Amino acid sequence: MSPVPQRTADASGVTYALVVEEIRANGITSVELAEITGVRERQVQHWAAGSSKPRDASRERLTDVYYVINQLRDVYRPEGVEIWLHARNRDLSGRRPIDLLRSGEFSPVLEAVERLTHGAMD
């Protein structure tokens, strides 16, 4: 019987499997993450299992989503992060952040997150 892979960060740092796990723990499904990163859901499952790594544009989008999640976690609990991502947002002209991420429009979402997190720190 093979040992179960370690799912917590250790001295070696963050892994793509942990990145996917953190994103999914904060309300983005594997299907949504696949749409955002431009891959099939099965590929997201491979990343989560640690059997492959994202490359090129999918890696950039994955790490951008991870950044958004971590910034939102400074303000909200996981359920609040999920709600913020899926609700219409006044700062985004009534658009849903998740829809913008799906269409590759990361800049407006990142700017809204920055405004939110800096406002929370003031």
Image: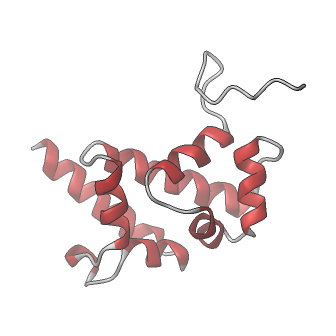
Along the horizontal axis of the image, is 29 left or right of 98? right
Identify which residue is drawn at 40% across, 45% down.
70
Along the horizontal axis of the image, is 56 left or right of 70? right
Q: Is residue 73 above or below residue 111?
A: above
| Residue 44 figure quarter | bottom right
Identify which residue is drawn at 78% across, 63% down.
42
Along the horizontal axis of the image, is 117 left or right of 22? left
Furthest-bottom residue in this view: 94
Furthest-top residue in this view: 11
Residue 85 in percent (x, y) is at 37, 66
Identify which residue is drawn at 58% across, 45% down.
21
Residue 27 in percent (x, y) is at 44, 58
Q: Is residue 11 above or below residue 40?
A: above
| Residue 96 figure quarter | bottom left
Q: Is residue 94 above or below residue 119?
A: below
Q: Is residue 55 above or below residue 84?
A: above
Residue 74 in percent (x, y) is at 28, 42
Identify the image's colour scheme: rainbow, by chain, secondary structure or one colour: secondary structure
Badge count = 0
Furthest-right residue in this view: 1
Please name whichever residue, 18 or 68, is drawn nearer the observer in this view of the structure: 18
Furthest-left residue in this view: 122
- Quarter in which the N terminus is drawn: top right
Identify which residue is drawn at 77% across, 60% down.
43
